[in-house]
Amino acid sequence: MDSHIFRKAANRLPDLAGIAVVRFNTRGTTSEAGTSEGEFDNGKNERLDVEAMIDYCFTELQLTNLWIVGWSFGTDLALQHAKDPRHKGLILLSPPLRTTTRDELLYWTTDPRPVVALVPEFDEFLNPMQAMERFAPLHTIEIIPVMEAKHLWVGEPSVARVLNEIVLRVAPLKAPLPTHFQHTSQTS
């Protein structure tokens, strides 16, 4: 998957909020960059991909304020496999809750880190009302219904809302994001 919401996060958040963005695909995923190695395993062996990326962020990139942001299927992976104690919390975009079990939701009730879900009003997989019901076991979750939005977060109002919600959690002093940015390149 080559999600435009993650592309825009990677293009904007470093300059606008000082937030490093690390994007990756799991096994068997195809994007413009090609197809990753391995085979899709409906969230089971993708655990290895999630754990490896989290470890890479800490050991190689030496990030200190890591939040796990998942979109769609990535939200199931985050809920199921992003249990490394070094990260700060989860931000879930358009969670379909296709493969996450009740027990996996209950795990996060015993973890003090925040879990935030942004749920589009017109999401065809899980709308805000359904999300309230399905996430009921995870009583500590913050569910944010996003009006006028759809699963893919298409359109600048949706993109701006998602990015601002991320910044509010990761770098709150940088919120809200500016609506205009003029990049000044330095030449020698």
Image (cartoon, rainbow, N blue to C red):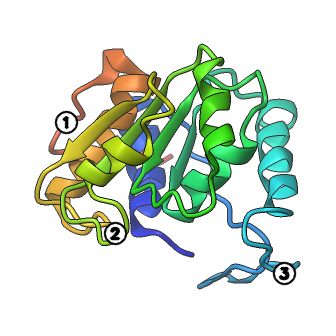
- Circle 3: element type: loop
Task: Please state which amino acid type lies under the numbered disc 2.
Answer: Leu
Query: Which part of the image, by quadrant, shows the N terminus?
Result: bottom right
- In this rendering, does residue 28 appear at all? yes
User: Which residue matches tag 3?
Assistant: 39
Task: Say left or right for 103 vs 188.
Answer: right
Which residue is tagged 1? 178
- At 19% from the left and 66% from the top, the residue drawn is 155
The alpha-carbon separation of the residues under discs 2 and 1 comes to 23 Å
Q: Earlier in the sequence, mark 1 or mark 3?
A: 3
In this rendering, is residue 72 above or below 30?
A: above
Which amino acid, mark 1?
Answer: Pro
Q: Secondary structure at mark 2?
A: loop
First-in-chain label (3 vs 2) = 3
Badge 2, how many Cα within 10 Å: few under 14, some, many 20+?
Answer: some
Q: Residue at x 45, y 55 (%)?
A: 95
Badge 1, how many Cα within 10 Å: few under 14, some, many 20+? few
